Image (tube, helix red, strand yellow):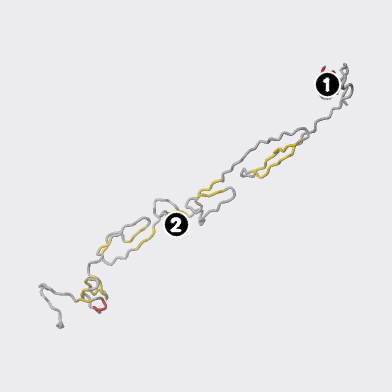
Amino acid sequence: MAINYLNSINLNQNELIKAQIENQPNDAAAGTGVEGQLYYDTTLDVLKVWAGGAWSEVGGGVETLTTTDGTYIDLTPNSATSGAVTVTADLSAADGTASAASRFLTKDNTWATVPQGDITALTEGTYINIDNPTGPIPTINHDLTSRTDTTSTDSPAFGGSFEAVTSVTTNTTGHITAIDVSTVTIPASPTITLTGDVTGSGTTSIATTIATGAVDFSSDKRCCYCN
């Protein structure tokens, strides 16, 4: 049976040999203590003291804390601190890049500036394609354009026709918007009517006249055999 002491015991700086601290399974079983009272928590296997109105572990925990800033993280305090320590962490955009615009932290752990203020994506348009449209750095390219030229195999005779491009219209960006195609018809072969001695062989026959160069088909001249 425990002996109740109504006054403090002064051991005059003598050792307390083989003394056992009160054992309790938890704080509730230890009850409400007085400042400086001790008990041993048999569940957690730690010595506890009543301080500031609650049971606290004596030693065994973190006694001094030192934090170090990480990538884009500022920690406070970041020097060795003892006692009850509250650590705060803030994002930091300091990465050596001078930028007055607002930036955001991307999934690849880099800071990026929102393009053109609040634009977060770009959409491709006519003749335009975009690489990496959601950033951080989109690349805008003009679509590649191919052209196939063909050579006409038409060989029209007299009275035949063929098509030819006579004009090309472009817009201010250099794209062709219209072409003018005209149909060209070759005049029919002229009809020459010859009269006279067609089958004869005399000096007045048509064959003899042409053979001797007497017929002149040059401009504004007609032979006597032509109408």
* The C terminus: image quadrant: top right
For the N terminus, the image quarter is bottom left
Q: Nearer the viewer, residue 214 or 130?
A: 214
Lateral position of residue 107 relative to residue 22, left or right: right
Nearer the observer: mark 1 or 2; the answer is 1
Apparent side of residue 6 relative to residue 148 in the rendered image (left or right)? left
Secondary structure of the residue carrying tag 2 is strand
Horizontally, residue 85 falls left or right of residue 19, namely right
Check disc 1 and give the amino acid type: Asp
Mark 1, Cα crowd under 10 Å, few <14 / some 14-19 / many 20+, is: few
Q: Which residue is mark 1?
A: 216
- Residue at 71 percent across and 40 percent down: it is 181
Q: Amino acid at mark 2?
A: Phe
* Mark 2, residue position: 104
In the rendered image, the residue lying farthest to the right is 196
Picture coordinates of residue 206, whole percent (x, y): 86, 21
